[in-house]
Image: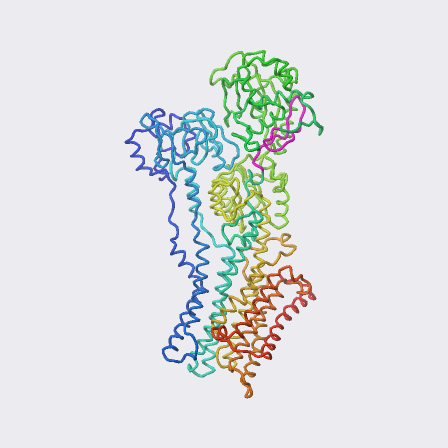
C-alpha cells in the first residue's frame, strides 16, 4: 500500500478530531464499513501485511562464493593441472605408478569445501521481517455493517472500526474513537517502559512525538488494561511498524573489516603470484633459449600458484571465530554472525538505549517529601518492603504519620495492580504506578483494602496536555481508631468522615502546587504560604537534578460528584500532600563497564526515548557524559540536515526523545565520521539502527524477536558489562587472526620463492607438487594455526585504543614480517635444496635421485613447527613463556611432525604423496636447517629488545 493512496491528512491523524478522521475515511463509528466498501478498499490499499523485497536466491549465494579471486585462481590451476595430466595420460608420458588427476581432484575438493563454508555463513535467511510479521495479531474484532465480527488481521482496511480489550495485540494503526481506562504498552515500538494512558478526546499538535501521541494506537503494541474503539487509519507498510520494515529493507549489508581485509589479502597474493609466475616463465624461456621445457615451467607455475593461496586460511578463520563464539556464550554474549566476533575488536562507539539496557527497567521510589521533611526510601524493585529514613536514620510511621496520608494517595490514585507471581512481585500496568503501589505497601497501605473503603465514582484521566490525573471516591465510614491502628494518619481518617466524596490528584509538581491552597501538616491542614511553596519547588528541583521522576500529590474533600469535563474548576483549592521521586535505577555494574569502555578508547553514547533531564542525570551518573554536556532532543535532531548532524555527532553523548528514524540517522552520521559503531537495543524501533550499525547488539531477555534477528550479537543477560567482555574477546580474536596469518603466509612466501628458484638455478624438476603444497597449507600449517587461535590475551588488551577497522591486513609491521620471514625461509630452504640436490646426485649416492625434493618438503614443514612455537609472542622469548599456557600449540607441533614423518616412512602414504625415503643423515640435516628458523625469530626478538622497540 502506498502512502500516497491514503486520504489527505493521513500522516497527522493525531491532530484531527474524531469526527474529522471518520469523515476523511468515510466511515461510521457505530456501524463501520459496508461489505462493498471493504472489497474496494482491500483492492485499493492491499492486505494488511508487511511486504518483503526479494533477496538473493540460494544458488546466487552459492555462486557468489566462487567469485573470490583466490578460489578463481585455484580453479584455474586445477583445470590446467587436469589438462597436463590428461595430455600425459593420452601420450603415455605419466611416470610409472603416478595417479592422474589427483592434484586436480584435491584442489577442486578444497575449492568446494571453502565454497560450502562461505555458503553456510551467508545463507542464513534474514528473519527480521518475519519477526515483524509475528507482531500482527492473527484475529481482530471489528464492527462491519453494524455487526461485530472477527476477521483475520490481514483483511483490515483503513476505515474499519476495531475493538480493543486487555491482552490484545493491536493489528493496525488507528485513531481512538472512545476508550475506558485504556493503557497500552508501546515499549516494543517507542522504547518507553511504562504503559501509556490513551485518550480519544485529545487533539494534538501535528509535530507531536510518536511516544506522546495519546489519541492513536499502533500496530504491534499491546493492550495492558481497559478497552477501546479505534478507527483504522493505516495498514500494511504505511503503519509505523511498516515504516520500520521499509528502513530494515533499505539498510545495506556492508562487508565486515575482516572480510574487507581478506579481499585485500587475496588481491595482493594473486597479483604477486601472477607477477612471479610471469618472471619464472619468461626467465626460464630466456635461459633455455625456447619453449622446449615449457611443461616443466607450467608445472612450476602451477605449484607456485597453489603455494601462494593459503587454502587452509578460510577454514582456520571460521574455526577461530566459532571458538570465540563459544567463549562469548559462556560470558552471556550470543554471536549470530561469525565475523562479528572479530569486528567487536574494532568498535570505537557504543550507542546504547537507556531503558532496560543501562537501567533496570524498574521504577523505584527513592525519596518522599512531605510536611517540609524529605525521607529516603529503601528497598529494591517492586517488593513492598523497606524502610523510611530521615537524615540517614530509620523512622517509624508513628513518628511521621504524614507518610501514610501520601501513601493512601499513591495507592488509590492508581490504575495498576501489584501482584506476586511465582514468589516474585510484578506490576500489571505502568511501572511508575507500580513504584507508587510499592511505596504504599512499605507504609502498610494495600490498594485492595482501600478500594473497598473508597469506591471510585469518577476520574479525570491523565494526558500530556493536562499533565495530571484525578480520581474521585465515595467515602465509606472508617472509624478513626481503626484507621489509626493500621498506621493511617488520623487527619485522613477524620477527612474520610467529613465529606461524602474525596478527590486525590497526582501529576506535575509545579502544576499541582499551583492549584493547591492548603498544605497537609500531619494532624491538621493550614494555608499554603509563599515560603512553603518555594521550599517545595526547591525540593522538586533537587530531586529532578538527581535524575528522579517527580510527581506531586494533593487531595480535596467534595460535597458532590463533579460533572464530566469539570476538571479545570474541580481541580482547584487542593490540599498539598507532598512529592514522590522515583528512579529507573542504573544497573550497578554499568558504571564500571562504562569506565572500562573509556579506558579501551571506546565512547559510549546514550540514545533514548526518555525525557532529556532524566537522560542527562542517568548519563552523568554512569560517566557517559560530563556535567553540562549538551543533550540533543528528537525535535532538534528533526530540524537538522544530515550535514549538520554529522558536524555535531562527535560532540553529543546524550540523545533524548528520539524516534526510530533518528536512531538510524545518528548511526549513519557516526559512520560517515569514520566511527565504527555498535548499537544496543531491545525494541522494534531499534531494529533498523541495529542492522545499520557495524555491530548490532540486542537484549536477550527484554529484546523483541525483531531486534534479535536484526542484530549481530545478543546479550543473554541484558547486561551492558557483557559488551565489554565481548569486546575484549573480539580484540583477542583479531590479534590471534593476525598471528596465524603471519605464521601461514610467511611460510607460503618461502614456498613460492623456493619453487621459483628451482628452475632458475638449474635444478631438474619441480621440488614440490601441488598435492604436497596442499598438505602443507592445510595440515602442517593448519593445525598449528588453529592452536595459535586460542592463544591467551595480552595483559594490556583493554588498555589501548581500538585498532582502526580500516587498517590494512598488512598494517603495523605484519606485511614486512611476512616478507622478511618468507625470505629467510626461502634462503634456508634454497640452501638446503642446493645441498640436497648435489648430495642426491653424487656419483656414489645409493638412494633415490629425487629424494632432494622430499628433503625440501620436510624442511619446510618442520621449520614451520619452530615458527609456531616462536610466534606465540611478538616480544617475549619462548624460554620466558609458560609452555603450558597454550598446550594446544605443543600438541599441534608434536602431531604435525609425526604426520609429516609418516608421509616419508609409511609406504602407502609415500606413494600417494609422491615422497621419497630419507635416511637418518638426510632427516637430521632437514631438522638442523629447520631449527635455524626458530633461532632466527628468537634472535629478532632479542635485537628488538636491545633497540628498545616493541613489535605489534
Tell me if residue 486 comes above or below residue 581 in the rendering: above
Predominant SS along the magenta part? strand
Position of the N terminus, as image quadrant, is top left
Quadrant occupied by the C terminus? bottom right
The front one of 893 and 616 is 893
Residue 491 sits above or below residue 236 on the image: above
Query: Is 57 a magenta residue?
Result: no
Horizontally, residue 876 falls left or right of residue 416, namely right
Residue 946 placement: quadrant: bottom right
Residue 314 image position (x, y, % from top left): 49, 61
Q: Position of residue 862 (x, y in %)?
A: 58, 71
Q: Is residue 898 visible?
A: yes
The residue drawn where x is 46% and y is 61% is: 114
Left or right side of 705 for 385: right
Q: Residue at x 61, y 53 (%)?
A: 801
Q: Nearer the viewer, residue 821 or 466?
A: 821
Q: Which residues are magenta?
A: 360-384
Say which quarter of the image contains residue 944. Answer: bottom right
Above or below, comparing residue 397 to residue 704 in the picture = above
Q: Nearer the viewer, residue 526 or 648?
A: 526
Residue 587's spot in the image, x, y percent?
61, 39
Residue 374 counted in the magenta span: yes
Amino acid at each position: 500500500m502506498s502512502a500516497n493512496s491514503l486520504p489527505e491528512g493521513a500522516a497527522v491523524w493525531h491532530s484531527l478530531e474524531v469526527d474529522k478522521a471518520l469523515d476523511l475515511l468515510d466511515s461510521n463509528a457505530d456501524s463501520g464499513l459496508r461489505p462493498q466498501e471493504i472489497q474496494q478498499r482491500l483492492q485499493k490499499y492491499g492486505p494488511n501485511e508487511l511486504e518483503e523485497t526479494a533477496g538473493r536466491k540460494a544458488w546466487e549465494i552459492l555462486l557468489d562464493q566462487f567469485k573470490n579471486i583466490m578460489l578463481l585462481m585455484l580453479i584455474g590451476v586445477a583445470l590446467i593441472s587436469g589438462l597436463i595430466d590428461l595430455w600425459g595420460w593420452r601420450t603415455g608420458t605419466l611416470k610409472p605408478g603416478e595417479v592422474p588427476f589427483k592434484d586436480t581432484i584435491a584442489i577442486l575438493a578444497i575449492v568446494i569445501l571453502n565454497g560450502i563454508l562461505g555458503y553456510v555463513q551467508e545463507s542464513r535467511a534474514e528473519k527480521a521481517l518475519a519477526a515483524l510479521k509475528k507482531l500482527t495479531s492473527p484475529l481482530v474484532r471489528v464492527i462491519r455493517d453494524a455487526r461485530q465480527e472477527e476477521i483475520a488481521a490481514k483483511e483490515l482496511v483503513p476505515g474499519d472500526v476495531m475493538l480493543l480489550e486487555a491482552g490484545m495485540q493491536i493489528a493496525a494503526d488507528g485513531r481512538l474513537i472512545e476508550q475506558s481506562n485504556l493503557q497500552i504498552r508501546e515499549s516494543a515500538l517507542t522504547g518507553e517502559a511504562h504503559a501509556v494512558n490513551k485518550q480519544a478526546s485529545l487533539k494534538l499538535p501535528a509535530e507531536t512525538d510518536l511516544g506522546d501521541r495519546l489519541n492513536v494506537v499502533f500496530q504491534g503494541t499491546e493492550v495492558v488494561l481497559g478497552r477501546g474503539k479505534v478507527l483504522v487509519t493505516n495498514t500494511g507498510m504505511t503503519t509505523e511498524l511498516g515504516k520500520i520494515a521499509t528502513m530494515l529493507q533499505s539498510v545495506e549489508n556492508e562487508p565486515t573489516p575482516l572480510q574487507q581485509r581478506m579481499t585485500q589479502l587475496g588481491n595482493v597474493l594473486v597479483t604477486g603470484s601472477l607477477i612471479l609466475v610471469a618472471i619464472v616463465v619468461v626467465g626460464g624461456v630466456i635461459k633455455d633459449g625456447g619453449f622446449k621445457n615449457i611443461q616443466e615451467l607450467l608445472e612450476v607455475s602451477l605449484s607456485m600458484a597453489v603455494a601462494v593461496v593459503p587454502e587452509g586460511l578460510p577454514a582456520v578463520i571460521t574455526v577461530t571465530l566459532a571458538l570465540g563464539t563459544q567463549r562469548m556464550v559462556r560470558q552471556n554474549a550470543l554471536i549470530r554472525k561469525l565475523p562479528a566476533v572479530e569486528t567487536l575488536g574494532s568498535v570505537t562507539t557504543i550507542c546504547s538505549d537507556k531503558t532496560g539496557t543501562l537501567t533496570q527497567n524498574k521504577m523505584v521510589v527513592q525519596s518522599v517529601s512531605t510536611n517540609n521533611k524529605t525521607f529516603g526510601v529503601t528497598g529494591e524493585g517492586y517488593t513492598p518492603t523497606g524502610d523510611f529514613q530521615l537524615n540517614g536514620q530509620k523512622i517509624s510511621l508513628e513518628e511521621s504519620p504524614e507518610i501514610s496520608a501520601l501513601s493512601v494517595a499513591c495507592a488509590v490514585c492508581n490504575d495498576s495492580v501489584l501482584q506476586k507471581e511465582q514468589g516474585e512481585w510484578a506490576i500489571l500496568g505502568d511501572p511508575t504506578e507500580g513504584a507508587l503501589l510499592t511505596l504504599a505497601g512499605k507504609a502498610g497501605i494495600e490498594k485492595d483494602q482501600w478500594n473497598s473503603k473508597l469506591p471510585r465514582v469518577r476520574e479525570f484521566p491523565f494526558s500530556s496536555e493536562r499533565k495530571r490525573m484525578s480520581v474521585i471516591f465515595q467515602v465509606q465510614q472508617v472509624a478513626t481508631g481503626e484507621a489509626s491502628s493500621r498506621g493511617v494518619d488520623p487527619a485522613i481518617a477524620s477527612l474520610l468522615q467529613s465529606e461524602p466524596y474525596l478527590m486525590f490528584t497526582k501529576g506535575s509538581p509545579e502544576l499541582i502546587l499551583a492549584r493547591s491552597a492548603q498544605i497537609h501538616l500531619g494532624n491538621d491542614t493550614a494555608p499554603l504560604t509563599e515560603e512553603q511553596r518555594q521550599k517545595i519547588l526547591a525540593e522538586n528541583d533537587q530531586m529532578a537534578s538527581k535524575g528522579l521522576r517527580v510527581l506531586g500529590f494533593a487531595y480535596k474533600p467534595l460535597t458532590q460528584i463533579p460533572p464530566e469535563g469539570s476538571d479545570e474548576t474541580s481541580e482547584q483549592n487542593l490540599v498539598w500532600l507532598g512529592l514522590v521521586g522515583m528512579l529507573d535505577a542504573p544497573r550497578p555494574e554499568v558504571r564500571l563497564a562504562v569506565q572500562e569502555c573509556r579506558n579501551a578508547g571506546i565512547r559510549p553514547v546514550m540514545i533514548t526515548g526518555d525525557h532529556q533531564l532524566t537522560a542527562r542525570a542517568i548519563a552523568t551518573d554512569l560517566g557517559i557524559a560530563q556535567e553540562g554536556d549538551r543533550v540533543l532532543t528528537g525535535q532538534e535532531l528533526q530540524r537538522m540536515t544530515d550535514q549538520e548532524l554529522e558536524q555535531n555527532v562527535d560532540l553529543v553523548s546524550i540523545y533524548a526523545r528520539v524516534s526510530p528514524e533518528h536512531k538510524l540517522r545518528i548511526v549513519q552520521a557516526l559512520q560517515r565520521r569514520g566511527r565504527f559503531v555498535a548499537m544496543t537495543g531491545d525494541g522494534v524501533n531499534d531494529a533498523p539502527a541495529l542492522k545499520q550499525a557495524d555491530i548490532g547488539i540486542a537484549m536477550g531477555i527484554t529484546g523483541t524477536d525483531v531486534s534479535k534477528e536484526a542484530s549481530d550479537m545478543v546479550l543473554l543477560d541484558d547486561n551492558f558489562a557483557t559488551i565489554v567482555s565481548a569486546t575484549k574477546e573480539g580484540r583477542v580474536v583479531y590479534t590471534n587472526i593476525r598471528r596465524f596469518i603471519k605464521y601461514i603466509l610467511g611460510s607460503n612466501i618461502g614456498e613460492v620463492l623456493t619453487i621459483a628458484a628451482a628452475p632458475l638455478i638449474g635444478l631438474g624438476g619441480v621440488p614440490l607438487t601441488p598435492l604436497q603444497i596442499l598438505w602443507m597449507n592445510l595440515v602442517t600449517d593448519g593445525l598449528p594455526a588453529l592452536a595459535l587461535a586460542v592463544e591467551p590475551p595480552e595483559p594490556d588488551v583493554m588498555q589501548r585504543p581500538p585498532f582502526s577497522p580500516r587498517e590494512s591486513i598488512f598494517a603495523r609491521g605484519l606485511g614486512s614480517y611476512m616478507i622478511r620471514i618468507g625470505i629467510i625461509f626461502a634462503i634456508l630452504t634454497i640452501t638446503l635444496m642446493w645441498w640436497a640436490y648435489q648430495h642426491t646426485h653424487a656419483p656414489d649416492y645409493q638412494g633415490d635421485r629425487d629424494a632432494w625434493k622430499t628433503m625440501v618438503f620436510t624442511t619446510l614443514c618442520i621449520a614451520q613447527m619452530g615458527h609456531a612455537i616462536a610466534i606465540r609472542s611478538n616480544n617475549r622469548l619462548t624460554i620466558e613463556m609458560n609452555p603450558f599456557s597454550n598446550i594446544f600449540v605443543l600438541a599441534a607441533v608434536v602431531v604435525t611432525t609425526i604426520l609429516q614423518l609418516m608421509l616419508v616412512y609409511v609406504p602407502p602414504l609415500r606413494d600417494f604423496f609422491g615422497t621419497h625415503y630419507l635416511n637418518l643423515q638426510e632427516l637430521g640435516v632437514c631438522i638442523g636447517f629447520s631449527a635455524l628458523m626458530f633461532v632466527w625469530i628468537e634472535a629478532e626478538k632479542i635485537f628488538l629488545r636491545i633497540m628498545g622497540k616493541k613489535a605489534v
